[in-house]
Image (spheres, rainbow, N blue to C red):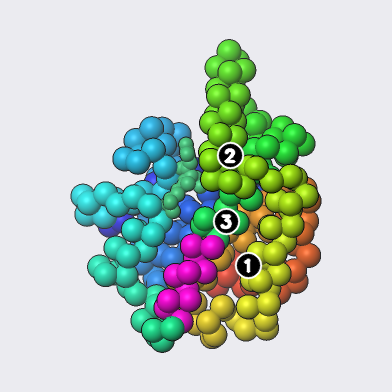
Amino acid sequence: MITLHGFGKNLGVKDPSPMVLKVDAYMRMAGISFNSNNKSNNLQKAPKGKLPFIVDDGQTITDSQFIFEHLKQNHVNLDENLSKEETALAYLLTKSLDENLYFCLVYSRWMCEDTWKIVKKAFFGKLPPIVRTFVPKIVRKKLARNLQGQGIGKHSHEEILHITQQSFIALSGLLGNKDYFFGKESCSFDASAYGMLASFIESDIDDEFTQVAKSYTNLVEYCQRINQKFYS
Ligand SMILES: N[C@@H](CCC(=O)N[C@@H](CS)C(=O)NCC(=O)O)C(=O)O
C-alpha cells in the first residue's frame, strides 16, 4: 500500500501544497489506492526536506516528478493513451506550473501582507506562544530568499500578478471547452493542473491572485468536475 505524506487540509484546500495535491489527484485519477499521512512532523521526516514523498512497499520516493514516474512504471500510466507529442507537451506544461506559477503562488501567500496574516495563522497559529512569534518570521525570511534566488521575487507585485494571469490565460485557452486538457480522459497533466488550480480556486483566501484565477469560468468548472468525479 502506498502512503502519501503531505501537510493535510488547510487554507480551505485539501492540501495547501499543489505538489502534494497533484500526487493525490494522480492516484485518484488512476484508481490507485493509497493512505494519506498528514502528521505535523512530515516535513522534518522528508528525505529532501520537501513534501510530498510517498512510501510504497518500503520504498521512499520524493519529488512529485519522481513520484509520477514511479507510479507510471509500477502502477498505472495515466499517459498511456497520449501520443508522443502530447506526452512531451504534458511534461513541459507541468514544468511551467511547477517552476513558474508555483512561485507566484508562494509569493502571493507569503509575501503579500494581508494574505500573509491569514497564512501565518493557518500554518503557525497552533504553535506555543513563544515559538509562534519567531518561527513564522524565520520561515518567511527563508522563502523570501528562495523567491529572490528563483527570480520571481525580483519583480514588482504588479509584474508577479501579470505573470500569474498569463498562466491562467494560457491554461484557460488550452482547456477551452474540453473536459480535460488532452480530451475526454484525464492524464498526468490534469493531476498537475488540478493541484495548482485548486490551490488558487478552492482556497479560502480572497486576494487578487485567487480572484484572477476564479475569473476563468472554464477553469473553475474544471476543478468542480474533478472534485465531483474523483473526490466525492
Ligand atoms: N520539486 C518538488 C517541490 C516540492 C515543494 O516545493 N514542496 C514544498 C511545499 S509545496 C515544501 O515542502 N516546502 C517546504 C520547505 O521548502 O521548507 C516536487 O515537485 O515535489
* Residues packed near mark 3 inside 10 Å, few (<14), some (14 to 19) or many (20 plus): some
The residue singled out by tag 3 in the image is 100
In screen coordinates, is 184 left or right of 84?
A: right
Queried whether the magenta region covers residue 95, the answer comes back as yes
- The residue tagged with tag 1: helix, strand or loop? helix
Residue at image point 58% right, 39% down: 148
Mark 2 or mark 1, earlier in chain: 2
In the figure, 80 relative to 150: above or below? Answer: below
The residue depicted at 39 percent of the width and 70 percent of the height is: 31
Q: Provide the major secondary structure of the magenta segment.
A: helix
Q: Residues within 10 Å of mark 1 (few under 14, many from 20)?
A: some
Mark 2 vs mark 1: give the one in front. 2
* Residue at numbered disc 1: 223
Tell me where the magenta segment starts and ends, as one range.
Answer: 86-96
What amino acid is labelled 2 in the image?
Gln
Residue at x 43% of width, y 76% of height: 88
Residue 148 — which label?
A: 2
Q: Residue at x 72, y 32 (%)?
A: 117
